[in-house]
Image: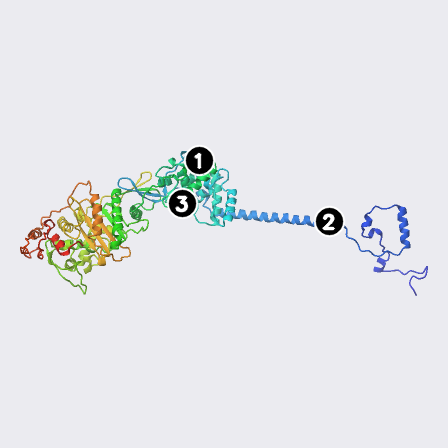
Amino acid sequence: MAWGKKKGGRKEPLFGLPAALADLRLTAADRIPNAEDDKPKKSAKSSAKRKSDDSDAEPPRERKAQPNRSSAKRRSKSRRGFGIGRLVYWGAVLGLWGAIAVIGVVIWVGAHLPPIQSLEIPKRPPTIQIVGMDGSMLAQRGEMAGANVALKDLPPYLPKAFIAIEDRRFYSHFGIDPVGILRAAVTNVLHRGVSQGGSTLSQQLAKNLFLTQERTFQRKLQEAELAIWLERKHSKNEILELYLNRVYFGSGAYGVEAAAQRYFGKSAKNVTIAEAAMLAGLVKSPSRLAPNRNPEGAEARAQVVLAAMADAKFITEAQAQASIGHPSYNVKPVGAGTVNYVADWIGEVLDDLVGQIDQSITVETTIDPKLQSVAEAAIIDELAAKSVKFNVSQGALVAMTPDGAVRAMVGGRNYSESQYNRAVTAKRQPGSSFKPFVYLTALEQGLTPDTVRQDAPIEVKGWKPENYTHEYFGAVTLTQALAMSLNTVAIRLGLEVGPKNVVRTAHRLGISSKLEPNASIALGTSEVSVVELVGAYAPFANGGFAVAPHVVTRIKTAEGKLLYMRQPDERNQVIEPRYVAMMNTMMRETLISGTAKKAEIPGWMAAGKTGTSQDYRDAWFVGYTANLVTGVWLGNDDNSPTKKATGGGLPVEVWSRFMRTAHEGVPVAALPNSQGSWGLSNLAQAASQVSAPAPSAAPAPAPANNGGYRPPPTRANVRPEAAAGLDGWLMDRLFGGNR
């Protein structure tokens, strides 16, 4: 039976989902509106007519819904708003984290700064001023810090020169200049390198006072924090004044006062505009632009500063043009030259004298500036003239009074090229200049200057030493042997008295180096320094008393407090007066007729001994008067042989030039105990028998071998010099020159 076909038929009840959907009908309100629905509604009549028409027409086709344009616009605006919101949100988050990171970095950098309580303006590092015996400045060690100069005492264009070239916005920033940093960054990018810095004067001062010079990001951050701290604690003028008195200007000069004195020989209060510009220009690269080293570079940089000053309206264009090329920087720096060898030697002994240096001090010395200059010129000029000919590259000189006070010291020909001190540090073989210790030992064992020993070939355990001329003269006195520097006699004496006794004698007189007690010690094969050998000769000049070579007399603080004063040495007699007299007379003969015949000081009694080491590696002469004891060494640092440079040549010439000047105007004095009671009667008798024979006369008879020397016959028509004595006659006739 069919459902629902018959009118009035029974309707069965529906349950579940069919029941729920049975009465479901769609109305116009449930439909999605289209464009036509948005138009204004027509009259009811029209509407009814349309409904009637619609009822007669075919059922409407299902049309595709058209998108709502206004709804799309609203959704688009909603999406844009959401994107901007997200951007603002994440920007705020990132900004917050960035601020936290910056604060963390600041805290971390601050944690690595010195404690706040220690952030005070530090004291200047100690300066050591070294002055001569006349009070004049010789050299300076440590930072050359001039006195602090108040900003108001400086010419106004001096600080403005620094502001113009280093920190144009100094008076407007807070310690860090963001504009300057940005400008420097742009400039560096354009030049593809670091061509401009962005540090302010406050940052530079912070670096100079509290930090190191290392180029690290951490140091730059610390510098920035300290600059801000300085700006909060000090005024602008105080910061500028501190900066000018602490900045480094090269050549060891810190502060404008020290720099002005160093380069211009005047106070910073009196510098000109040109000089102020040059000082301001040095800050960029003080070592490279120092005017005493690079005058062209310093002048070019000064012109840049002058242009910056004119651009900042600190000076006029006319003043800038007038100042170009006018700084007077041709001033010789204080302490230049070989006196720096003295300064280095002083630096080595200061710790023993006053301990650790924690304040500025003045060291008063025994150095005579005049004699120092003469000694320097003597060494330099001699080497300049003859170093190539004799293959000699270096020299040293030490001059001291008979009581050990060093008056002059030259440790090399050029300190700027080599700071190695050949007068104190270097040790070389003294050669025959060591022989006086052998002869003194022999005299103390009972021999006399007239004692005769054989000059003949000798062999010691396979060693066959020879004389300089490879000649032998038989029986000679000790005086003759020392004056002619006969090696075989010195070796025989050394073996006779004992090498150990020779070493003891040398140490007793002042040699401190280790000496080997062997047969060759008589020829000076153990190495010694110049200063100790000269000091060991001093007892011959002072009557037999030991001395300690010294150069420091007093040390005071900058305020005048006495820290050290040298006490006189105890008079320790190390040579008996009679032996002093014998040695002085014997070594006088070296200058009169022996190997140092060129060494002459008019009007003065002088004595000494030459020395030449094996293969001509070292050339020495140590000579003395009652006024000065001076030793000269010439040779090569690498110990290479010279071209037959001997002690009687270049060293004697240097010694004579120095000593003649050193004795000008000094009252003449004789050597102590120079007239011994023993005399030289035999030598005088032998010398008197060497007379000038007639052309046809036979040779003069030789004296008996009772202490004299049997000379070979004189040549015809050659008159020996009577004043030179027998030794002089032998040297001139047999050697034909000096050794």
**Horizontal relation, residue 323 to residue 612: left or right:** right
Q: Amino acid at mark 1?
A: Ala
- Tell me the residue that label 1 is attached to: 318
Q: Label 1 neighbourhood size at 10 Å, few (<14), some (14-19), many (20+)? A: few
- Tell me which corner region of the image, top left, top right, bottom left or bottom right, holds residue 601: top left
**Helix, strand or loop at disc 1?**
helix
Q: Residue at x 54, y 47 (%)?
A: 102
Real-space Cα separation, disc 2 to disc 3, in angstroms:
72 Å
- Tell me which corner region of the image, top left, top right, bottom left or bottom right, holds residue 238: top left
- Tell me the residue that label 2 is attached to: 73
- Tell me the residue that label 3 is attached to: 297
**Helix, strand or loop at disc 3?**
helix
For discs 2 and 3, the disc positioned in front in the rendered view: 3
| Along the line of sight, the residue nearer the viewer: 70 or 191 | 191
Q: Label 3 neighbourhood size at 10 Å, few (<14), some (14-19), many (20+)? A: some
- Tell me which corner region of the image, top left, top right, bottom left or bottom right, holds residue 666: top left
Q: Amino acid at mark 2?
A: Lys
